[in-house]
Amino acid sequence: MKEEVRKAIDLIRPNLQADGGDVELIDVGDDGVVKVKLVGACHGCPMAQMTLKNGIEKFLKQQVPGVNSVVSV
């Protein structure tokens, strides 16, 4: 599942990079929890939590069966 998540993140990465940010995949747990690190302009941005939940998490749940949540570490 980790490779599927990595490929899905690569699809949304250009959207984040367009605003000066990016996301790094840290880990995918057996429980379906995806751990990521927001970097660049995303790190510390007031909208980061919304981007994480309404953008990244929503997209990954649609693209990769088994993803339950996305958390920032």
Image: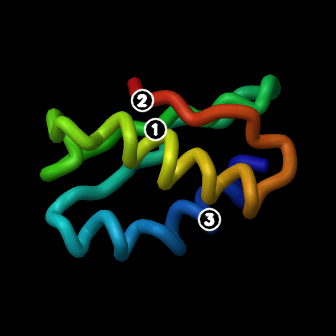
In this picture, residue 31 sits left or right of residue 46: right
Which residue is disc 3 drawn over?
8
Q: Could you say which quadrant of the image residue 7 lies in? A: bottom right
Q: Are marks 2 and 3 in contact (CB under 8 Å)?
A: no
Where's the C terminus, which quadrant? top left
Spot occupied by residue 67 in the image (x, y as percentages of width and height):
75, 41
Residue closest to the eye, 2 or 71: 71
Which residue is disc 1 drawn over?
36
Helix, strand or loop under label 1 = strand
Q: Earlier in the sequence, mark 1 or mark 2?
A: 1
The three-letter amino acid code for the residue at tag 3 is: Ala
Name the residue at the right extreme. 65
The three-letter amino acid code for the residue at tag 1 is: Val
The image's mark for residue 63 is none
In this picture, residue 23 sits left or right of residue 1: left
Helix, strand or loop under label 2 = strand
Spot occupied by residue 12 in the image (x, y as percentages of width and height):
47, 68
Q: Earlier in the sequence, mark 1 or mark 3?
A: 3
- At x 26%, y 69%, the residue is 17
The three-letter amino acid code for the residue at tag 2 is: Ser
C-alpha gap between disc 1 and disc 2 = 5 Å
Colour option used: rainbow
